[in-house]
Amino acid sequence: MPSLRELREEAADCRACPLWQTGTQTVFGEGTARARVLLVGEQPGDQEDREGRPFVGPAGRLLDEALERAGIDRSAAYVTNAVKHFKWEARGKRRIHAKPSWSEIAACRPWLESELAVVKPAVLVCLGATAAQSLLGKQFRVTKQRGTWVESDLAPHVTATIHPSAVLRQRTDEDRHREMDALVSDLAIVAAVLARAG
Ligand code: URA
């Protein structure tokens, strides 16, 4: 079994889909191999692409706050993405997030499977539809199934919730607060299982 460091080094040269041509670098997962919870997002954003680390931009800060409110220590978690290169479109000087295609998600899945095989988390959390559909199947509907436990061979406990960016996209403070509270309550079931499992 390769180590996370070996996987990260191998993934740095990944050419399994065309996104390596426009992304700055592969953004591999981050965290300890002993993490009991593994969180999967969609793909790195602009800041993550530049820094080479997952969830360090605005969505990452919101995720940190949600994890803290739910009572989950991010430093004890492993955080990664379904797709490990930033897919973007130019809008003026800005690089705007573009949704990864199914073939790009599928091309990247072996990295995610390797991360899961090394970390062997007690709890797997899919953040948003891309991660959920990559790991739980195309028919998975986050809006309907979020915050529930899903039968899966991937980990003893598997669940999905919305992506932190969905909170950031809300137009009013009231909507943002409501979505943030819902994200925190989905994550609270994860905290409860982690506490029970000791
Ligand atoms: N959104 C994601 O899905 N992942 C990141 O790493 C950052 C933003």
Image: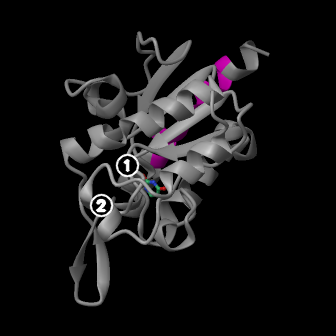
Which label lies toward us, 1 or 2?
A: 2
| Mark 2, residue position | 19
Estimate the x, y position of residue 80 in percent, counting from the top left: 52, 45
Up-down relation of residue 165 to residue 52 (above or below): above
Name the residue at the bottom extreme.
93
Q: Quick one: 151 or 180, which is closer to the camera?
A: 151
| Circle 1/circle 2 CB separation < 8 Å | yes
The magenta span reads 180-193
Q: How is the image coloured?
A: one colour
- Residue wearing tag 1: 83
Q: Amino acid at mark 1?
A: Val
Q: Quarter holding the N terminus? A: top right
Residue depicted at 25% across the width and 28% down the height: 141
Give left or right: position of 10 versus 176.
right
Q: Secondary structure at mark 2?
A: helix
Say which quadrant the C terminus sits in.
Answer: top right
Residue 150 sits in which quadrant? top left
Q: Is residue 4 above or below residue 116?
A: below
Distance in Å between CA atoms under marks 1 and 2: 9 Å
- Within 10 angstroms of label 1, few (less than 14), some, or many (20 or more) residues? many
* Magenta stretch contains residue 192: yes
Residue 193 percent location from the top left of the image: 65, 18
Q: Is residue 189 visible?
A: no
Q: Residue at x 54, y 28 (%)?
A: 116
Q: Is residue 158 left or right of residue 100?
A: right
Outermost residue toward the right in this view: 198
Disc 1 element? loop
Q: Does 107 sit left or right of 176 as displayed?
A: left
